[in-house]
C-alpha cells in the first residue's frame, strides 16, 4: 500500500467538510476520486498535503502517519501535487516554471534527469520551453503544472481536475500523459468532477458526495449503479 486514508475528518471554519473519508492507492495504480463540485475532492487533497488540519482519522504514506508533517516534508517523502486550475507563473518561461522547485527534494536522480522525465510526459512542452507562462493556453498551463510536480520525481501524483475547463482538442494529450506517468512507475490519484473525462484505464474509482465516499469500484461498476450515477450527474 502506498497511500492509505482511514476515517478522515476535516472541518473548515467549524463546518465539517469531510466525514470519515477512507481510500487507498497502491503502487502503479490510477485511482480516481469523482464527485460533483463542492463534494470534498480538493479538501481531501489539501489535507493529504498538510494544508488543512485533520480533525480525525489517519493519512498513512508507506505506513507512516503524515499528520502534522509540514507540506515540504510530505512532498519530500514522495507525494506530488498539481492543484486545480493552473499555478503557472506568468512572468517565468515554461522551462523555469518546471525547473523552479527541483532543489526542494533530494533524490538519487539529478535535477536535469528529473526535468527530462517531466518533458517526456508532454513532449510538446519542449518546443514551448522559452515561452512565457502568460502566452500559454489553458491546456498548456495544465501540462506545465503537471510537469512541475513531476520534476520532483514523486512516487504518487495527486492531480486535482486534470481536464476541467480545457478545450476538447487537448483532452487526449492530457489522458496520454497520464498513461505515460503510470508507465514511469508512479501512481496517480486523480480528482475529477466529470465522470466522462475519467480515463478508461483507471484502476478504481471512489465516488465522493457531501464529504463522504458513497461508492467504490471499477468504472464499469460505478456506471452500472444507477443511483450513484444520478448523484455524479447531479440529477439527484
Ligand atoms: N476555503 C473555504 N472556506 C469555506 N468553505 C470551504 C472552503 N473550502 C472548501 N469549503 C467547503 O468545503 C466543501 C468541499 O469543497 P472542495 O473540497 O473544494 O470540493 P470539490 O473539490 O469536490 O469541488 C465545499 O462545499 C465548501 O463549502
Ligand atoms: Mg475541487
Image (cartoon, rainbow, N blue to C red):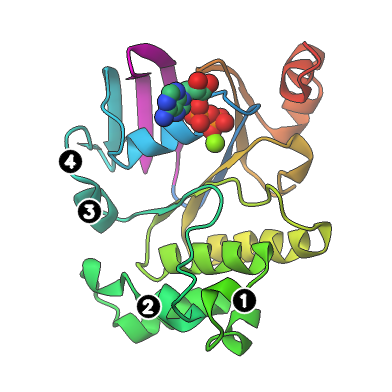
Q: CA distance from mark 2 to mark 3?
A: 17 Å
Q: Which mark is residue 69?
A: 4
Q: Which residue is mark 3?
A: 72
Q: Nearer the viewer, residue 160 or 20?
A: 160
Q: Which mark is residue 99?
A: 2
What residue is shown at x 25% (from left), y 37% (from top)?
63
Q: CA distance from mark 1 to mark 2?
A: 18 Å
Q: What residue range appears in magenta? A: 1-26
What residue is shown at x 45% (from left), y 68% (from top)?
89
Q: Is residue 174 left or right of residue 47?
A: right
Is residue 189 inside the magenta stretch? no
Callout 2: helix, strand or loop? helix
Which circle, 1 or 4, is nearer the viewer?
1
Q: Which residue is mark 1?
A: 135
Mark toward the start of the polypeptide (1 vs 2): 2
- In the rendered view, tell whether residue 63 sits above or below residue 56: below
In terms of image quadrants, where is residue 233? top right
Which circle, 1 or 3, is nearer the viewer?
1
Q: Position of residue 179 (x, y in %)?
A: 63, 61
- In the rendered view, tell whether residue 206 sits above or below residue 148: above
Other residues around mark 2 within 10 Å, as few (<14) / some (14–19) / many (≥20): many
In terms of image quadrants, where is residue 75? bottom left
Amino acid at each position: 500500500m502506498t497511500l492509505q486514508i482511514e476515517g478522515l475528518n476535516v472541518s473548515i471554519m467549524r463546518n465539517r467538510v469531510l466525514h470519515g473519508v477512507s481510500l487507498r492507492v497502491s503502487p502503479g495504480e490510477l485511482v480516481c476520486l469523482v464527485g460533483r463540485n463542492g463534494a470534498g475532492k480538493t479538501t481531501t487533497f489539501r489535507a493529504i498535503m498538510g494544508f488543512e488540519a485533520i480533525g480525525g482519522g489517519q493519512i498513512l504514506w508507506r505506513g507512516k502517519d503524515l499528520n502534522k508533517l509540514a507540506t515540504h516534508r510530505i512532498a519530500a517523502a514522495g507525494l506530488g501535487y498539481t492543484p486545480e486550475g493552473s499555478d503557472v507563473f506568468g512572468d517565468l518561461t515554461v522551462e523555469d516554471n518546471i525547473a523552479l522547485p527541483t532543489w526542494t527534494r533530494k533524490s538519487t536522480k539529478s535535477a536535469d534527469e528529473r526535468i527530462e522525465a517531466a518533458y517526456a510526459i508532454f513532449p510538446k512542452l519542449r518546443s514551448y520551453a522559452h515561452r512565457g507562462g502568460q502566452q500559454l493556453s489553458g491546456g498548456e498551463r495544465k501540462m506545465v503544472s503537471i510537469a512541475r510536480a513531476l520534476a520532483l520525481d514523486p512516487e504518487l501524483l495527486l492531480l486535482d481536475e486534470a481536464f476541467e475547463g480545457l478545450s476538447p482538442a487537448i483532452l487526449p494529450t492530457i489522458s496520454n500523459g497520464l498513461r505515460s506517468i503510470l508507465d514511469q512507475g508512479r501512481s496517480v490519484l486523480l480528482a475529477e468532477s466529470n465522470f466522462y473525462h475519467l480515463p478508461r484505464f483507471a484502476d478504481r474509482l471512489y465516488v465522493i458526495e457531501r464529504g463522504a465516499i458513497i461508492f467504490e469500484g471499477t468504472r464499469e461498476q460505478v456506471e452500472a449503479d444507477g443511483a450513484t450515477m444520478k448523484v455524479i450527474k447531479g440529477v439527484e
